[in-house]
Amino acid sequence: MQQLTGLDTQFLAMETDTTTGHVASLAILDPSTAPGGKLGLAELTAVLRGRLHLLPPMTQKLQKVPFAIARPYWIEDPHFDLGYHVRELALPAPGSQEQLSEQVARLHARRLDRSRPLWEIYLISGLADGYVALYTKLHHAAIDGVSGNEVLSVLFDLGPEGRTVAPPRELPDAEAPNTLGIFARGVLNLPWHPIENARALPRILPHLDIVPAMVGVPGSRAISRTLSRVRNAIEPGDKAVIERPALRAPHVPFSRRISPHRRFAFGSVSLDEVKQIKNHFDVTVNDVVVSLVAGAVRTWLVAHDALPERPVVAMVPVSVRTEEQLGTYGNRVSVMMVEIPTHMPDPVERLRATHETLKSAKQQHNAMPASALQDVTNFIPFAVHARATRLMMGLAASPQVRPLCNLVVSNVPGSPIPIYFAGARMKAIYPVSAIANGTGLNVTIMSYLDRINIGVVGDREQMPDLSVIVEGMRADVEQLVTVIAPTVDGDGEGDGNGQGPERQGPERHGAGQAGTSTPV
């Protein structure tokens, strides 16, 4: 039995009638490499049944503490029903990408049942070329990007023959905790809450001015400015504190209150071409990717006569999971707030501006303790956590309040070698992430083999033409490749020898661990 952290709880608290807290992935599989050339519900269920004992988040459910005196716990579901979580459906002919996008959007809009373990897997057949799709949905309260990668690494193999998995250890039967036992545990832990907060306070105080932005407080710019003045008055000679620029997110069409409905678009660009661009301009792959997002968002805004004079502000999740924390679940993430240069029409200028902006943002982020976001969310008493979160999310969608940010941009490294599920080779994998009031657009990138795969989630009412984002990123790659073509042909640069990802931070992309791909 494990208690959720404050950050884990935040992803539960954000859920409303219009907002969901889960993340997902869409894997495209070729069943011709599987035994008998088939991947059906029986094969899917067999893999899961043989490996669920290696995946605690998939057999555990939430257990609330009476009277909300403490955060909930994860407990083993005594009535676990694998058949409930594993489902199948078929697309009608011709099984096009548009049909698949629409089906995934509908599945992704549905909340998970909190009385059961918080995940679902759908096997979708009827795709063109005889392929099948695997849509895997898990709640963000249970996993972040790195731990989600570890879930997929358990389910996927490095070859079509699969691998032998050790059976579960024989453990004595344990009784499910009763309500009184959970309540007693919560009461016993109450005295430790102020002690934990007192220990975290020295880590948070030097960065108190960014707390409102980290937890999503509307009007955080004014609050942060006031807290900065207080901090500087207390520690006027503190040169270790980096001055943080005030970010002012403009109002754009996807920064309003969202509906319960979603749209999903997906596609890919060449990883080799992105690395050629990276090499030529001496930037990182992540710089190129974020610049492509900025260009695509600009294209969409121009098409809707909604381009602001100021650059839009993106929230960029960053993994802060250490080597010692690998193999554990829950959330170990932080965030960066970054202006992306949507106001610049030239793709080369956008790329250079993106490089400088991200370099500065990373310096500011690295000056903070890795546990800052975790510490901040742990300060909030659980009894008021959900109400406070929903109040802030409601204010974030108000036209009278300036948005904290406009969209989420995430970059997740995937496998550079082929991986397989039940013998079926994975052709591609696309992230499917979350949106919220005020941030009705999410662009998540995931590499696999020689492609950078793009998954875009938006509000159905605000962004009916979401595919423009994917097409805009492709167009920017073509423009930048055209610019550097004479240099690449002439001196051999851009040969695709990129840099591998770093464990902490989103700035690298491409050479991940086999079978590890899911959004933050």
Image: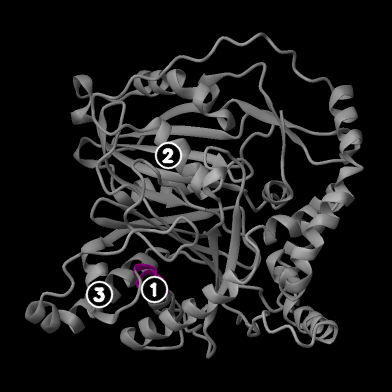
Closer to the camera: disc 2 or disc 3?
3
Observer-side mark, 1 or 2, equals: 1
Amino acid type shown at disc 1: Asp
Q: Position of residue 357 (x, y in %)?
A: 48, 81
Q: Is residue 107 visible?
A: no
Q: Which residues are magenta?
A: 285-293
Q: Nearer the viewer, residue 431 or 457?
A: 431
Q: Secondary structure at mark 2?
A: strand
Q: Is residue 263 above or below residue 125?
A: below
Residue at image location 79% in from the left, 41% down from the top: 71
Could you say which disc has been placed on residue 279 in the image? Answer: 3
User: Residue at label 1?
Assistant: 287
Name which of mark 1 and mark 3 comes first in the sequence.
3
* Residue extending farthest bottom: 309
State which quarter of the image contains the N terminus. Answer: top right
Count the labels in the image. 3
Q: CA distance from mark 2 to mark 3?
A: 35 Å
- Provide residue 220's location: percent of width, then percent of height: 74, 76
Category of crowding for the residue at label 1, using alpha-carbon neighbours closer than 10 angstroms: few (below 14), some (14–19), many (at least 20): many
Crowding at dot 2, Cα within 10 Å, few <14 / some 14-19 / many 20+, comes out as many
The answer to which quarter of the image holds residue 81 is top right
**243 and 8: which is toward the camera:** 243
Q: Residues within 10 Å of mark 3 (few under 14, many from 20)?
A: many
Quarter of the image where one finds residue 467: bottom left
Q: Main secondary structure of the magenta part?
A: helix
Q: Mark 2 and mark 1 in contact (Cβ < 8 Å)? A: no
Residue at which label 2 appears: 135
The verdict on residue 286 being magenta is yes
